[in-house]
Amino acid sequence: MYVCQGQFNRGPLHERKCGEFVLFWPFFLTQEVLFLILVRKRELDALNTLSGSGRRYVTIFFSFFIFEAFCSQVSPIFALDIVPFATKNQSPLVQIYGFPSAGNARLISPGEKEIRMMLDYASNYVEDRNAVESITLDGETARITLQGRYGVSKNREYGIEIPYVVHGGGFLDSFIIHYHDLFGFPQGGRDQAPRNRVRFHYTRDGAEKLRVERSSNGFGDVSLTAGFQMYDDGKEYPRAAALRISLKLPTGDSDSLHGSGSTDFSCWMTARDDYKLRYGHAGIFAALGFMAMTGGDVLPEQQRHYVGFGSVGGGWSPLSWLALKIQLDIHTPFYTDSQLRSLSSSSAQLIIGGTLAFSERTSLDIGVSEDIVTKTAPDVVFHFALRTRF
C-alpha cells in the first residue's frame, strides 16, 4: 500500500511533505491493468492490435506517472514554467524524421539533470486520390519517448531522445466518428472505412510506393541534442533565448515506419518572455528553424532534403500548480512531386492544454492537438509529458 503522511506548515511555503512510501507488488503485476482503466470494455478487442510489447511500454509510462503523482512533494509557492509542448506532427510519414519540438529557451543549471517521459497517441485517417496518385493513412500510433538533458555549464547542455513507436488499428475510430456527428464535422470518409484497421499505403502511376498493413512496434530513430544559452536575464519571470541543435540517427526500422533511414540535422532558435500579473503570471514563446536530411528509405524519390519549421504560443498560470497553454506548430512539406495535400502541403497543428505541477521539479503536460491544415497531420493527438529534474 501507499502511505503518505502529510505535514502542513502554515508558513509561507505551505509545504506538504510525503512520508514513507511502500509500493505493493500487485501495482506492476500485470501489463493490462492500466489499459482496462483507460478504455471502455467494448473497445478492448481493438487494443489487441497493439502487441504485448506495445502495451507494456504504454503501461510503464502511465505507471511512472502515477508513481510520480503520489510520491512528489507539493510546494504550492513557486513560478511554474510556461514552456512549449514537447510534441510534433505525428503523421506516420512525418514522425519518422528528426523534426524537433520547440524546447525550453532556458537551459537547465550546470550539473542538473532532467528526465522527461512522453506519450503521443495519434489517430490518423486520410484517404485521397487523383488521376495519378492514391494515398491511405489509416491507423493509430503511440510514440513513447524518453528524453534526457544534462547541464554541462551555465550556457551549454546536452541531451538524448529515445523513441519507441507502436503502429496499430487502435480503438478511437468509433469515438471520433461520434464526435464528428455530434458537432456536425465532416467525416472525410472515416465512417465508411473499416474500423480499427492499420493501412499506410501510397501508389503513384500504378506503382506501389508504400505499403504497411500490419501492426508493429519497435525503437525509433535516436536523436542527440545540444543547447546553447544566447540570452537569459536571470529573473524569476525570465526573458531568455537559446540556440538548439539536433542530430537524428537512422536507428529505427524504416520498413515499419519506425524510422526514416535518413540522418537529419536540425538547428533552431527558441525564445520566451514571462510576465508577472496580478493573478499569477503569463508567458509567450516562439521558435524558428530548419532541418536538413540525407536520403531516406521512405518515398526516397519524393523526399525533400530541407524543411523549415516554427512554433508560437503562450500560457497563463493562475495558480502555482497550474498553467493553461495554447500553441501553433507549422512546417513546410517533407515531400515533393505530388498533388496530394497530405504529401505536398505545409502543415499546421493547434495544441491546447496545460501543465500540472506536482512539485517545483516535477510536472505533467497534457495537451490535445488538432490539424489546422487538414490531411497534413493526424485528426487528433493526445499528448502527455511527465518531467522531473534532479
Image (cartoon, grey):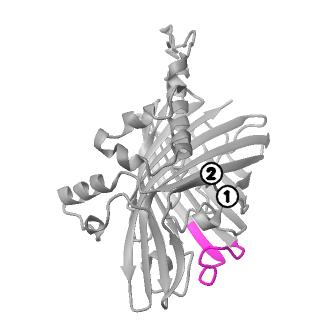
Does 11 sit above or below residue 26?
A: above
Kindly give the residue lying farthest to the right in the view shown: 153
Q: Which residue is mark 1?
A: 221
Residue at horizontal 72%, vertical 36%?
113
Residue named by callout 2: 163
* Secondary structure predominantly adopted by residues drawn in magenta: loop
Residue sitting at 64 percent across and 69 percent down?
Answer: 290
Q: Earlier in the sequence, mark 1 or mark 2?
A: 2
**Number of other residues with Cα within 10 Å of mark 2, as a class: few under 14, some 14 to 19, many 20 or more:** many
Residue count near mark 1 (Cα–Cα under 10 Å), binned few <14, some 14–19, many ≥20: many
Q: Residue 375's x, y, as percent? A: 40, 71
Residue 25 figure quarter: top right
Compare residues 380 and 61 and report the one nearer the observer: 61
Place of residue 187 in the rendered image (x, y in percent of width and height, measured from the top left): 26, 67
Q: Is residue 117 magenta?
A: no
Image coords of residue 381 (percent x, y) = 43, 54
Magenta range: 293-309
Residue 73 shown left or right of residue 231 in the figure: left
Whether residues under marks 1 and 2 lie with C-beta atoms below 8 angstroms apart, the answer is yes
Q: Is residue 85 visible?
A: yes
Quadrant location, the C terminus: top right
